[in-house]
Amino acid sequence: MSIHPVMQRLADKLKRTDLPAFVPGDQIRVQVKIKEGDKERLQAFEGLVIAINRGPQGTFTVRKMSFGQGVERIFPFNSKVVDRIEKIRSYRVRRAKLFYIRGLRGKAARLKEVGREVAAKA
């Protein structure tokens, strides 16, 4: 199933290039534009990337814990609502989709951080 050439050109034109590279298992902070009346402000949503769906309308899912409750939000890559993305830290994972994190609580939900082990051994 291929995309029509005109649609492909349009998708390439709208594609954002200012976003950093990140993968599932990275902790990121997404700055989201919130419109309140006639004013606009930025709100941060910080959490773990648990899934990335590629394609012309690609999305990524970020999960965070808020007051003991898991909150997930799905962001489109090319959305104008996403102002910027900051990569905070990376964790070592062996899967592309981290949906199993939903069922874990407390210490069971911990992941090993990449880069910290090297500093600890030195």
Image (cartoon, rainbow, N blue to C red):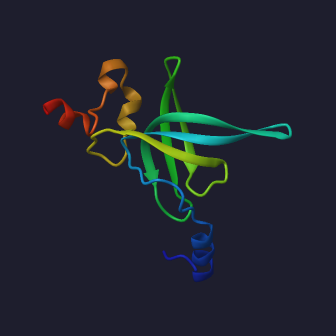
Q: Which residue is depicted at the point 30% across and 23% down?
A: 108
36 left or right of 6? right
Q: Which residue is depicted at the point 42% across and 41% down?
A: 50
Residue 76, image x, y percentages: 58, 52
Q: Which residue is depicted at the point 26% across and 44% down?
A: 94
**Which residue is most to the left?**
121
Q: Which residue is depicted at the point 46% across and 59% down?
A: 54
Q: Which of these two is toward me, 106 or 17?
A: 17
Residue 22, image x, y percentages: 41, 50
Asked where in the image residue 89 lies, by quadrant, the reply is top left
Residue 118, image x, y percentages: 18, 37
Count of numbered labels shown in the rendering? 0
Compared with 5, 68 (above or below) is: above
Quarter of the C terminus within the rendering: top left
Compared with 86, 2 (above or below) is: below
**Which residue is most to the bottom?**
5
Compared with 3, 22 (above or below) is: above
Residue 48, image x, y percentages: 43, 37
Q: Which of these two is toward me, 35 or 86?
A: 86
40 left or right of 81? right
Compared with 8, 44 (above or below) is: above
**Which residue is most to the right?**
38
